[in-house]
Image: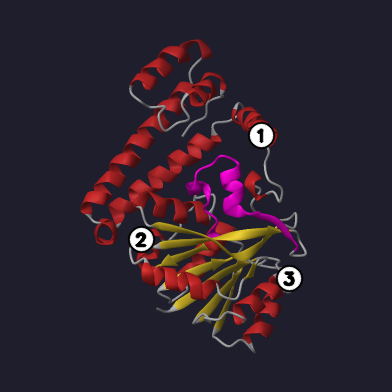
Amino acid sequence: MKVSIALAAYNGGAYLAEQLESFAAQTRLPDELVVVDDGSRDGTPDIVRAFAARAPFPVKLVENAENLGYAQNFGKALSLCSGDLLFMSDQDDVWFDRKIEIVADLASRNPGAACLMNDALLTDGELVPAGVSKLGQIRAAGLPDTAFVMGCCAALRRELLDILLPIPEKSPSHDNWLVEVADLFGLTHRCEEPLQYYRRHGANTSNFFVNETQKPSRLDRLSRNLRQLWRRARSSDSLAKEHGFHGALDARIAERREACEQLIGSDRLGEVESKVVRRRETLEARLAIRRRGFGARPLAIITLWRKGGYRASGGVPGVLKDLIVCGSAV
């Protein structure tokens, strides 16, 4: 099994060298490292070149002429890899020395898993552990394990990437697209063992609340729900983004049906398609409700409720949101 690491870099000079050294310290070395720099202005490419000169494996550096943004930059890095199992890496974390060995072994023992994820220990900017892990924070917040979609903790098989690349242009992040589709396909294996540090230094791209270095209390969860409700009361962006995700997946399945059937079988693919269609219809109905006048919403909500549209849309909290949230076009 050939192993590649895809690293998307942008102004990563403060921490990148530590991450690169953790690759070189792996008990199972990668077969290649592909770094795509997205127009850094801090000498990041020089750090990569210096590492490449002494690395115990091939290192390929590509410098973008134009800034692509982190989602498309990751997509480009993955597309340039030649491995059978591809690890995604952020520029500011540090891997434990057995990460590749353990995940590659998991892949060998779980041939039906095309997306393998490991837990990560949260630290401060100086790599001082906070005593919590990412998966632990998700569970403490009362969220399902499927909320754990961090790309930097994921390794993907080539067969899945051949379907999912390129990442849709409107996708807000690479990890949501890649891992959430793997979940829908039933191809994700989540390992509870932390195999890396996840550094929180104040300038991280992700601000998801479970990335906080303290365990969320009941008050934290209540406060988060109220803030979320207030934010969504001014916009339907979250529903529109989810609708876009399902639309992009529907189009990708139609485009690469044969490869999808080879990966998960025609019966399972049919189930996925039916689920995607139902979800899109529900999202379209909810977005239409939010574009109505407040007085006209209750009847439409009751109709959607009777059809079971709120079973996967938060139940009563989903109804409350649809009663008060401002509408927006798809």
Percent coordinates x, y for residue 228 in the rendering:
62, 33
Task: Identify which amino acid the numbered label 3 is placed on.
Answer: Gly
Residue at position x 66%, y 34% in the image:
218
Is 261 above or below relative to 35? above
Q: Residue at x 50, y 69 (%)?
A: 87
Q: Please report whichever mark, 1 or 2, sits nearer to the chain's N-terminal start.
A: 2
Which of pointers 1 and 2 indicates the residue nearer the eye?
Answer: 1
Q: Is residue 101 visible?
A: yes
Q: CA distance from mark 3 to mark 1?
A: 38 Å
Q: Residue 217: percent from the left, percent from the top?
A: 68, 38
Q: Is residue 93 above or below residue 21?
A: above
Asked which secondary structure carries label 3, the reply is loop
Using the image as rendered, state which of residue 175 and residue 293 is in the foreground.
175
Q: Which of the pair 220/239 is nearer the observer?
A: 220
Q: Determine whether the residue tagged by mark 1 lies in a helix, strand or loop.
A: helix
The structure residue drawn at horizontal position 41% and vertical position 51%, both measured from the top left corner, is: 183
Tell me whether circle 2 and circle 3 mark residues in contact (CB < 8 Å): no
Q: Is residue 107 above or below residue 293?
A: below
What number is the disc on residue 13? 3
Tell me: 307 left or right of 121.
left
Query: Residue 284 in the image: x percent, y percent?
Result: 40, 30
Tell me the kind of residue under disc 2: Ile
N-terminal-most mark, 2 or 3: 3
Is residue 180 shown left or right of residue 306? right
In the rendered image, which residue does mark 1 sit on? 218
Three-letter amino acid code at disc 1? Arg
**Crowd around label 2: few <14 · some 14–19 · many ≥20 (10 Å):** some
Q: Which residue is mark 2?
A: 163
Q: Which residues are magenta?
A: 128-151
Query: Which mark is on residue 7?
Result: none
Q: Residue furthest top?
A: 295
